[in-house]
Amino acid sequence: MLSNFSFRQFINYLALASAFSGAAYVLNNFITFVFDMPGLFGTLSIIGFDLEAPETSGAMAVIIGILQSSLYLIAIIFPFFVLRRQSFGMREVASLDRGAEAIITAAFWSVLLVGIADASISFVRIENMLPDIVGADLALSLGKPAFRGVYVHVPLIAVGALIAVFRRGIDVIWLAALIVFAELLIVITRFIFSYEQAFMGDLVRFWYAALFLFASAYTLIHDGHVRVDVLYASFEKKVKAKINIWGTLLLGGPLCWIVLTRGLWNDTSAFNLALLNFEVTQQGFGMYVKYIMSGFLIVFALSMLFQFSSFLVAQLNVLEQDDSASENAPENVTG
């Protein structure tokens, strides 16, 4: 029993440390490549390790690099203190669920605001109304992906994150209604007014990609993902919990980390390359949001990592309850 308890404690630690480390990794990636800070590898290079890392200099860069590295230490050490609580279990599950919920909510509002704003800018550009509204110079600048990204998209993403601080609940389900509305608008304008532009299809794809990737963690909460349950449905609750645990350890968690590390490892990795260069599909009058869509995969991997960690702790709690019930059963029968 002691060995089982120790193993379960280790798995609980692994779940918490994985979620916290994922958040630290994404935050460090943002600080490192957006603000040219050293990050973990850069800090280790400064103190003498021979590692490939961006060249940085200055006392402030070193201090920030040390602070960045300390985030990983916190992510590794903090779960030990959490596990020492006697009431460890469903409260931590709820906390991890709220973490995933916050990530998804911030992403939803960001996508909603950016989609409406970028589509509106594209529309008035096509109709040659933008210079009359904002002036010729600003209209020209808004046609440049980097300018629109920095001065339109980034502030709206910040607003979306701020809304998520005060807003509770999974709002991403409303994206389904918005997609239907955007598609209906295309049908009406195409077949009634013979009018269709590239940005209209871009908006549908933008929101549809967000719906598919953001809702994945929400679906996992409610066990709504497609499952081949020819055998699974007939298993006992304890066996189901063990299958879910090993599936999370061997498939779910590693998948999230592969997505994050492959996409964010250095400045030439797929996600970083697109985000740092404000990559767009075209230079015409379509929406300039392709680089943001690469960021959807970051939201997907991080929210799913939190949700898989929550799922893992919840399934371990099922085993604990089953063991407690089995130990108490003979006493109840005898009494």
Image: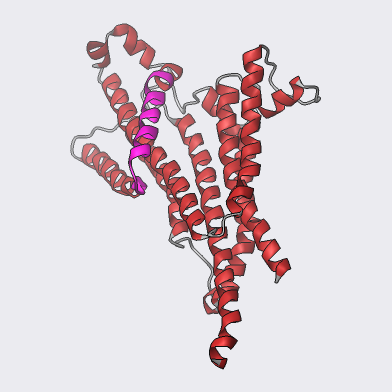
Question: How far across and how far down the image is residue 286, in percent?
Answer: 37, 27
Instruction: Tell which residue pokes out farthest to the top in this image.
Output: 137
Is most of the magenta stretch helix, strand or loop? helix
Q: Quadrant of residue 103?
A: top left
Report the residue at 56% width, 19% height from top.
Answer: 35
Q: Is residue 62 magenta?
A: no
> In the rendered image of this protein, does residue 10 appear above or below residue 165?
below
Report the residue at 36% width, 49% height from top.
Answer: 170
Instruction: Tell which residue pokes out farthest to the front in this image.
Output: 335
Report the residue at 61% width, 41% height from top.
Answer: 75
Report the residue at 70% width, 62% height from top.
Answer: 6
Left/right placement of residue 200 relative to residue 226 reads left
The C terminus is located in which quarter? bottom right
Q: Quadrant of residue 102?
A: top left
Which one is nearer the viewer's eye here, 192 or 311? 311
Which one is nearer the viewer's eye here, 187 or 261? 261
Question: How far across and how far down the image is residue 81, in percent?
Answer: 61, 48
Instruction: Tell which residue pokes out farthest to the bottom in this image.
Output: 334
Q: Please name the colour scheme applied to the rendered image.
A: secondary structure
Left/right placement of residue 218 relative to residue 89 reads left
The part of the chain drawn in magenta is 150-172
Question: How far across and how far down the image is residue 90, in percent?
Answer: 49, 60
Left/right placement of residue 189 relative to residue 50 reads left
Which one is nearer the viewer's eye here, 12 or 78? 78
